[in-house]
Image (spheres, helix red, strand yellow):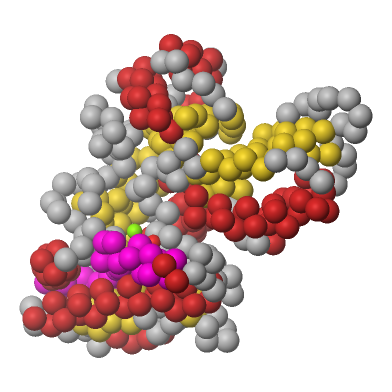
Amino acid sequence: MALIVQKYGGSSVGDTDRIQNVARRVKTYRDRGDRVVVVVSAMRGVTDNLIGLAKAISPLPSEREMDMLLATGEQQTIALLAIALHALNIPAMSLTGAQAGIVTDGVHTKAKIANITPKRIHELLDQGHVVIVAGFQGETREGQITTLGRGGSDLTGIALAAALEADLCQIFTDVDGVYTADPRIVPTAQKLDEISYDEMLELASLGAKVMQSRSVEFAKKFGVVFEVRSSLNDNPGTIVKEETKKMEGVVVRGVSLDKNQAKVTLVRVPDKPGVAARIFKALGDAAVSVDMIVQNISHGSGTPATDLSFTTDKPDLAKARKVIDDLKPEIGFGEVIATETIGKLSIVGVGMKSHSGVAGKMFDILAREGVNIEMISTSEIKISVVIDLAKAEQAMKAVHAAFIG
Ligand code: ASP
Ligand code: MG
């Protein structure tokens, strides 16, 4: 008799048929005698619709109210799944994040889990219930509803698996596992049997939409081994776990493309100590996520000035622009150029630690495709470039073909 945490994403619960499918799958585990905790996302499209409603009223809605609004998406699904399980004569009870004991900090729309007290979950399991928990949400110590950032149901699933010391954690989605690239863009992409946390983390944060990156960080920190698999078939998925020696033999495990980034360039920023600190402190204070930063060498005569570019998530762009515009009188830079037509293409593999010439090979492929590189960043196991969105998919296919096949 195992304790299993299963998380089902928005597409797995996309309509009432699929919710009934999930209920049947849960039933098979339950019939085996397992104790099952199910975490669900909002039905596909629901969160985006809610955001659309708010944005139709205000370009910068209050983040506290956004949490209040978005948390309703998952609440629909938990209740519908409970109803579907009841229809199969399975005792089941749904819980909001708060009812499940998920306590977060107070950063609305991207709260962090502070702790989980799963007392109620244990009680319900002891009474023989399947427990269904709303993903993506929690509450502060003061009782304010919070959400955990887009894709945050994954974090709920992983964090509950850790808190409950589950025997098995399964992340159900609409793909068979983690692929070497998005198969919708790269038809030759292959499913991986296993991948290390670090590789998965880079792929997730780099826009391989399989999982929310914070949830993988959390899994790594707490050593939660989990499986990513499909809710539409019974194929084995991809196991995500700590790196093994064998994994280093492969140079590039995966290629990812993030189309959700925007680039902001500040022209002629005064080149003196404290300016970058001022800009990025202000962005940080506004909870704007900044990814890549590139600063050029000073140019021109008179006061030295430099161009400064950074990338941020597209949804943060309006907030970023406001912060930058507010700083302009104080710092005195020139024009601000913001563009959303960029893509971040990345190759990832723990094998890069022990192989050389990987960057050169990647840039050579891009050159042959006639793709200009606007920004570059690297880590021990990753190389990323920012390129024109219009050429991004073509570039991704070429890079995948050269490194993986
Ligand atoms: N419903 C939320 C979202 O769409 C959370 C999730 O799906 O994991 O971002
Ligand atoms: Mg999701």
Residue 184 appears at what percent x and percent y?
Answer: 25, 37
The total number of labels drawn is 0
User: In the image as oriented, which residue stretches furthest toward the right?
Assistant: 302
- Residue under the image location 29 percent in, 85 percent down: 124
In the figure, is residue 227 to the left or right of 118? left
Residue at image location 82% in from the left, 46% down from the top: 332
Whether residue 285 is in magenta: the answer is no
Quarter location, residue 259: top left
Could you say where residue 107 lies in the image, as x and y percent from the top left? Answer: 58, 70
Q: Position of residue 39 (x, y in %)?
A: 31, 69
Give the residue at x 54% y 24%: 373
In this rendering, position of residue 363 left or right of residue 233:
right
Q: Is residue 216 above or below residue 358?
A: below
Query: Residue 48 in magenta?
Result: yes
Q: Is residue 28 shown to the viewer in this render?
A: no
Percent position of residue 367, x then y: 48, 14
**Front residue of this view, candidates 172 and 46:** 46
* Residue 334, image quadrant: top right
For this orientation, the residue located farthest to the left is: 88
Left or right: 29, with 41 as reference point: left
Res 60 quadrant in image:
bottom right
> Quadrant of the image for the N terminus?
bottom left
Can see residue 76?
yes
Left or right of 137, for residue 78: left
Q: Quadrant of the C terminus?
A: top left
Look at the image and give the residue range highlighted in magenta: 30-55
Q: Residue 19 or 397: which is nearer the viewer?
A: 397
- Residue name at image x 70 percent, y 53 percent: 325
Question: Which quarter holds ligand 1?
Answer: bottom left
Residue toward you, 27 or 245: 27
